[in-house]
Amino acid sequence: MRESGTKYIFFTGGVSSSLGKGLTASSLGRLLKCRGLRVTMCKLDPYINVDPGTMNPFEHGEVFVTEDGGETDLDLGHYERFIDENLRKGSNSTTGGIYSSVIAKERRGDYLGKTVQVIPHVTDEIKKRIRGLGTDDVDVVIVEIGGTVGDIEIVPFIEAIRQFRRDVGRENVCYVHLTLVPYLGPSGEQKTKPTQHSVTELRSRGIQPNVIVCRSDRMISDDLKRKISLLCDVPIEAVVSAVDADNIYQIPLVLHEEGLDGYILGLLEFDEASHPIDLSGWERLVHQVDAAVRPVHIGIIGKYVDLPDAYLSVVESLRHAGFHHGAKVQIEWVQAATVPDLLERDGLRSFDGLVIPGGFGERGVEGKIAAARYAREHDLPLLGLCLGLQVMVIEVARSLAGLEGAHSREFDATTRHPVVDLMDDQNDVAEKGGTMRLGACPAQLLAGSQVAEAYGAEVVTERHRHRYEVNPRYRGALEDAGLVCSGMSPDGRLVEFIELPGHPFWVGTQAHPEFKSRPGRPHPLFRELVGAALERAEGRDPRLIDIGAVG
Ligand code: GLN
């Protein structure tokens, strides 16, 4: 069979949001990669924000940062972790971004006096962006459409992907629709009606799905599959049961078991024989996950802790590090503002390690500073990420360098000692989009430092997203007080990593290493944090703990 050109797989969702469309799409991406295909992914988000950069992470979840500095939807984090490919700014488009381009073109006169309309101008812009991802080095582009069919804002996207098949040929496009098959307790039945309705909605927009993936808390029986097949007009092999998995890394195996990847391969006219699947690496990972049982208790000191998705990549990075050590990381969320009270009751005592993640305009910042101090004084392993590094620097400034009232100018505009401050004069910063330092930046590590040892390298690249920096004017004072700046920007101006010699692990980075951790390749800093935390956990003498608890 002749294979030519890039193929496109579109994922739409029906019935309800939060069915795990991103994870299902990512899992298919992983399966296709296991068949030797070159895969990239993208997310089209129907909301009007130009990008998620301005969205509150406590409503929308984390902002995932790409190598090239894109501020993107958190699903891109799933994509990167599953397909193990770096994505780009262009891998996430929103209605706002698309309209901005169309309106800019209109202002430039590019439309030559024509009336600018949703069809064809907006849909053309959507299609152009999708096509732009189908470069020569890509066999399959997987496109996830955010939201659910029937949403008001989704219509131009559905129309664009409908047209797309005409543009590139039927054999090059596959539509996968993800729905919910709920189990109704009182009648003891799984119900297909919501699926029928959402497929009807999709058809009313001109798209007949090729594959229907049914999310359910239990397997979909063959009888039910036959029913869905008949009512929704897809072959029975194209009805896939995606039952809840124990952990997200099992999903590719569940979908493969259901024959999803093989079916789609045939549909897209790939020669299945030349793309045999090799799942051994992924199966090894799943075994590793199952075998991760050594308990270790890590606290994440966050601003709001009600929406854990706000720190999704941090959580995943901790889990990856756990897989490496055979450890089950038990995460406990600690609201930063409560830390001073907790400390009065010695309430951080049960933790084996802490993470202070990034944040903006923090209310609970004093709590984070107090946690950094507690960790320093009690040899408790701590990893500070971005704002986390900044609060560690403030802590050292106040407690060890005698800089009373030291602060970041983000939180105290009139502080006497702005040990963390804006560096607006920096050309590099201006070039990278206003005052925000965004995307991958290299750092030179100090030979022999804990950080250099962890990475096993002297030059590393990490992704950034922040405005403030350690103030170079205070570097001398901080170092005199014992802080080691173990990684600097190549020009030697910006502090990228810090550590404290003699402490088991008290390390901060100005970057967001959580965006680069992969399930089978944990990030070195998370790996070392969890390693140090395990040592502490397993080194505790249980009798002493008991006595302590009673006393
Ligand atoms: N608010 C801090 C800054 O802008 C830290 C940002 C972050 O943690 N991502 O520098």
Image (cartoon, rainbow, N blue to C red):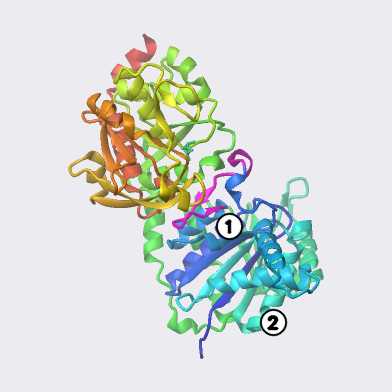
Is 405 or 89 nearer to us in this picture?
Answer: 405
Q: Residue at point 33% right, 13% down?
A: 547
Residue at image position (17%, 42%) is: 448
The residues colored magenta run: 56-72
Horizontal and vertical percent position of residue 163: 71, 76
Q: Residue furthest top?
A: 551
Indicate left or right for 488 with 128 as reference: left
Judged left or right of residue 268, residue 321 is left
Left or right, 331 with respect to 97, comes to: left
> Which quadrant of the structure image shows residue 106?
bottom right
Please state if 532 lies on the left or on the right of 93 as rendered: left
Q: Quadrant of the C terminus?
A: top left
> Residue 120 placed where, x, y %?
75, 73
Residue assigned mark 2: 166
16 lies above or below 301? below
Q: Is residue 65 magenta?
A: yes
Residue furthest toward the left? 448
Coordinates of residue 519 in the picture (x, y in percent): 40, 53
Answer yes or no: is residue 463 visible: yes
Residue type (three-letter) at the residue carrying disc 2: Arg
Residue type, label 1: Gly
Q: Earlier in the sequence, mark 2 or mark 1?
A: 1
| Coordinates of residue 5 in the picture (x, y in percent) | 53, 83
Q: Nearer the viewer, mark 2 or mark 1?
A: 2
Residue drawn at the location 76% of the way across and 70% of the way down? 232
Kindly indicate the quadrant of the structure image that contains residue 116: bottom right
| Circle number at residue 22 | 1
Q: Does the rendering let one see residue 254?
A: no
Give the residue drawn at x 55%, y 39%.
308
